[in-house]
Image: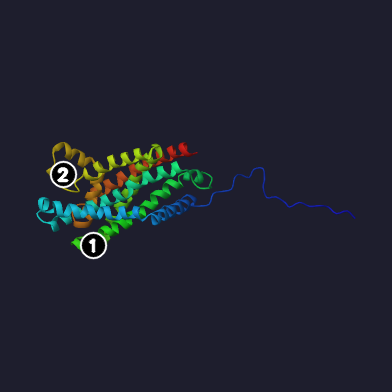
Amino acid sequence: MTSQKTTPATHTSAGAGPPRRRRFGLLRHSLLLAGRSLTKTRRNPGVLGDAVLLPVIFLLLFVYLFGGAVAGSTHAYLQYIFPGMLVMTTILSGMMATGVNLNIDIKKGVFDRFRSLPIGRSAPLLGSILGDAIRYLLSIAALFAIGFVLGFRPHRGIVDAVAACLLTVLFGFCLSWAFVLAGVLIKETSAVQSVVVLTMFPLAFGTNMVAPAKTMPGWLQAFVNGNPVTQVVDAARGLLVGGPVAHAVVSSLAWSAALVAVFAPVSVLVYRRRTY
């Protein structure tokens, strides 16, 4: 009696395609890489210290240096400048780090390792920005703490205050894509730092954050009114201390959407060409 060998049946067929990607794969991978970014921050507390302390130092300096001259008292000026400092916090804690850190990781070959992993090609970029968003929240918490000690109180309640914080974090997230592009496009880290600094100061200080736009020369008023950061400052000020908010909020959301629509696809394209 002869025995017949059998081979295990295979479940593949000629028409079978590649395995399907798991749902929400890009989001999961981005969150994991955001955790990596936060781990780097935890191991280098100086980075977090800069993100938390720098806005607080700016707030103290502006309030006590210019409060009496601009508003007549430090308390009155604190109510005016605090919403602007809230927006500036997201710029200082995010923009100054995102592009530079990405550039350093690319030069060190970290992204070469990501290339060998089965993750979305945009996940390292998105993960880095999401990690920065967590730092935004920590910086905002520290700013509110020192503002509370100095005497600042939201005039429109906790819901509007949370809305102001979320709006500024959203804008900071969207604006960071412009500096992601600088980080992946420019090869030298020092050049990336120069671009970030030279862009950050006109964006942050060329607004009505420190003084009303009507007190400025006409040419500067035109720049301030066209600066997207001004719209976010107006929205945050209206939500925190009162005043019209509808137009400023809509403008802030429109600018945020435009920044993502322009810079995110270009950043991913440049990143893929440089690292793949």
Res. 28 visible in picture: yes
Q: Which of marks 2 and 1 is in front?
A: 2
What residue type is disc 2 on?
Answer: Ala
Neighbours of disc 2 within 10 Å: few (<14), some (14-19), many (20+): some
Relative to the observer, which residue lies in front, 47 or 151? 47
Residue at image position (22%, 59%) is 147
Q: Height in image: 208 above or below 45?
A: above
What residue type is disc 1 on?
Answer: Gly
Relative to 56, 181 lies left or right: right
Q: Residue 276 carries which label?
A: none
Residue 134 point in image, percent of width and height:
36, 55
The N terminus sits in image quarter: bottom right
Residue under label 1, please give it. 157
Q: Distance between the residues labelled 2 and 1?
A: 27 Å
N-terminal of the pair, mark 2 or mark 1, is 1
Residue under label 2, please give it. 213
Relative to the observer, which residue lies in front, 190 or 165? 190
Helix, strand or loop at mark 1 = loop
Neighbours of disc 1 within 10 Å: few (<14), some (14-19), many (20+): few
Relative to 42, 72 lies left or right: left
